Image (cartoon, rainbow, N blue to C red):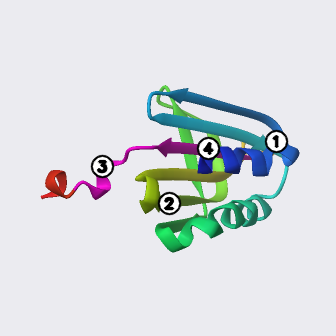
């Protein structure tokens, strides 16, 4: 089971909607939740915790933003976290965006995960 699969499975019980798509070495996942984004982040951190010894985690806390589509603002980001995780053993990188989103009437939490199973970050000949 990949780390992305573990994130999806860990959020499954509290998700209203989930989707995972795989194409080649890339996998993406999406979960829509009514749960508070801070609670969701604790679940994500707990899932990644066993991998930290053999990886690098970078986390950014967001206090706002906008989601544009086709040049138009569709949603506001009210808060959230962006987690980058690099798992050295399998050369895997994950980008996990955990957003508190609002359309002006309704708020929800959305988690988007991108997993690259063959990141070139550790190929020294390509980084020189």
- Distance from label 1 to label 3 (Cα)? 40 Å
- Mark positioned earlier in the residue sequence (1 or 4): 1
Which one is nearer the viewer's eye here, 35 or 119?
119
Which one is nearer the viewer's eye here, 72 or 56?
56
Q: Where does the magenta region start and end?
A: 108-123
Which one is nearer the viewer's eye here, 48 or 77?
48
Q: Which residue is at a point 76% across and 58% down the rendered structure image? A: 40
Q: Which residue is at a point 58% across and 45% down the rendered structure image? A: 113
Which one is nearer the viewer's eye here, 126 or 97?
126
Q: Position of residue 21 (x, y in %)?
A: 59, 28
Label 2 sits on a secondary structure element that is strand
Q: Is residue 9 above or below residue 41?
A: above
Q: Is residue 126 left or right of residue 41?
A: left
Q: Is residue 72 above or below residue 50?
A: above
Residue lying at the far left in this picture: please name it: 128
Location of mark 2 (residue): 85
Mark 2, Cα crowd under 10 Å, few <14 / some 14-19 / many 20+, is many
Location of mark 3 (residue): 120
């Amino acid at each position: 089971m990949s780390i992305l699969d573990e994130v999806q499975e860990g959020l499954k019980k509290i998700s209203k909607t989930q989707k995972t798509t795989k194409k080649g070495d890339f996998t993406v996942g999406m979960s829509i939740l009514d749960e508070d984004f801070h609670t969701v982040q604790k679940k994500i951190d707990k899932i990644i915790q066993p991998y930290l010894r053999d990886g690098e985690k970078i986390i950014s806390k967001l206090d706002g933003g906008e989601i544009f589509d086709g040049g138009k603002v569709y949603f506001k980001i009210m808060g959230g976290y962006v987690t980058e995780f690099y798992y050295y053993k399998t050369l895997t990188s994950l980008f996990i965006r955990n957003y508190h989103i609002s359309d002006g009437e309704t708020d929800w939490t959305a988690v988007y995960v991108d997993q690259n199973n063959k990141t070139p970050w550790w190929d020294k000949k390509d980084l020189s």
